[in-house]
Amino acid sequence: VIFLLLFVSRSKLVPDFALTIHLIHLIITSLYTHAFPSNWLWWTLQAASATLMTSLGVWSCQWRELRPINFGGNAGATSSAPRASGEAAEVDNGVNHGRGRGRGNGIDGGGEYEMVGMKEGSENNV
């Protein structure tokens, strides 16, 4: 299931991938033993494995697809008070400059987006 989560990006592709892996396993087993598997326990195990792999793979990919997207804003900013251990908080004028990727992080961005009014007049017309 972890293999499916890492290599299959969409949940609707999981059943095809899982059943293809089991078909390849059937072919390799048949070529190795020079016979088609006839044991009912083998077929039961393969059916249970395919069912479990498909259902858990679809669930895990849907869980990953439906997680909230973080755009790197200041949603989890800490207070501007110094920490109890004596370290100064990484806060400058009420803006937290946390380490992380994304737009708005760091000293120049501030993490907030706001509408900026346009200057009226002919000086900025293009």
Image: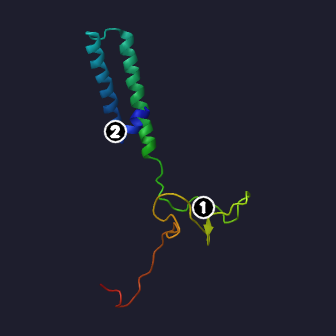
Question: On the picture, is 39 further left or further right than 113?
Answer: left
Query: Which numbered tag is attached to residue 77?
Result: 1
* Viewer-proximal residue among 92 and 114: 92
Query: Which numbered tag is attached to residue 3?
Result: none
Residue 3 locus on image (x, y percent):
40, 33
Residue 43 locus on image (x, y percent):
35, 15
Q: Residue at x 69, y 60 (%)?
A: 87
Judged from the image, the secondary structure of the residue bearing numbered disc 2 is: helix
Q: Residue furthest front?
A: 87
Classify 92 as above or below 62. below
Residue marked by disc 2? 12
For residue 17, which quarter of the picture? top left
Classify 95 as above or below 116. above
For residue 99, which quarter of the picture? bottom right
Distance, label 1 to label 2, CA atoms, is 37 Å
Q: Residue at x 39, y 11 (%)?
A: 41
Q: Nearer the viewer, mark 1 or mark 2?
A: 1
Classify 102 as above or below 42. below
Question: On the picture, is 67 further left or further right than 34?
Answer: right
Judged from the image, the secondary structure of the residue bearing numbered disc 1 is: loop
Disc 1 marks which amino acid?
A: Ala
Residue 2 locus on image (x, y percent):
44, 34
**From the image, which quarter does the C terminus lie in?**
bottom left
For residue 77, which quarter of the picture? bottom right
Disc 2 marks which amino acid?
A: Lys
Nearest to N terminus: mark 1 or mark 2:
2
* Viewer-proximal residue among 57 and 123: 123
**From the image, which quarter does the N terminus lie in?**
top left
